[in-house]
Amino acid sequence: EAAVTQSPRNKVAVTGGKVTLSCNQTNNHNNMYWYRQDTGHGLRLIHYSYGAGSTEKGDIPDGYKASRPSQENFSLILELATPSQTSVYFCASGDRLGGGEQYFGPGTRLTVL
Amino acid sequence: QQKVQQSPESLIVPEGGMASLNCTSSDRNVDYFWWYRQHSGKSPKMLMSIFSNGEKEEGRFTVHLNKASLHTSLHIRDSQPSDSALYLCAASISNTDKVVFGTGTRLQVSP
């Protein structure tokens, strides 16, 4: 079965601090995604990637950067964390743009104080 | 920007009853619809997908799609307490960049 892992699972950060969320997939999927989930907003796409070395902006990229150093790894970086970035973050992988099933990691709960 | 609207926001059905969930896309170019289920504290998992007009059945779950109205619906018959979850609808355009998710319908099945 598809496997996507995320670390850390929980994180408390201070306002203005730097936060890095990591994601690893063993599915050999080309595409990887970062979403945040907030009550009333569903899943919102932050950044995605077509493959190693590529990153693309999603619907809400402001305040976030992404890095895809390899097929397996995709990171989300908050350079200057703010309380509005408190949320649950999900990473996902998939093998086809748009038309393919996405496999989600377990999520990271981030609290910015 | 493409939007995916789901209704109702929440739904309570008795055990053994039928649950019906709705989803509509605002983008006429959409050609794939997905239904994901997310149990509390867990990550979303794909439940069913539908790409062609008509109906698709898998066990207790049936999905309908009307491409002309960009409307899909998910029906769960003989609902069980384990079906209690957040149901997310997603829409995408083949060979494009991303999938857009709706805000979900929270289903509670009462024993």
Image (cartoon, grey):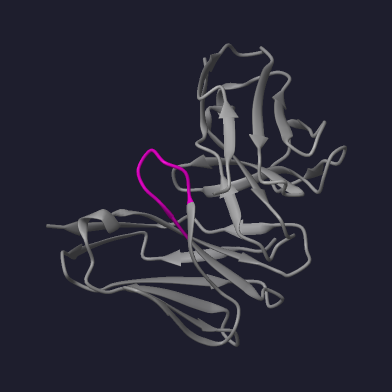
Q: Position of residue B5 (x, y in %)?
A: 51, 65
B42 in the magenta segment: yes
Q: Residue furthest right?
A: A53
Residue interval drawn in magenta? B36-44
In the drawing, does residue B46 fall left or right of residue B111?
right
Quick check: B33 above or below A23? below
Quick check: A70 above or below A100? above
In the drawing, does residue B76 fall left or right of residue B80?
right
Q: Position of residue A30 (x, y in %)?
A: 77, 49
A77 in the magenta segment: no
Q: Looking at the rendering, in which quadrant would you find the N terminus of chain B?
A: bottom right
Residue B33 visible within the image: yes
Q: Position of residue B22 (x, y in %)?
A: 42, 72
Quick check: A33 above or below B93? above
Between A80 and B20, the one lying in front of the other is B20
Q: Quadrant of residue A76?
A: top right
Q: Residue at x 52, y 41 (%)?
A: A37
Q: Residue at x 63, y 72 (%)?
A: B32
Q: Residue at x 66, y 64 (%)?
A: B2
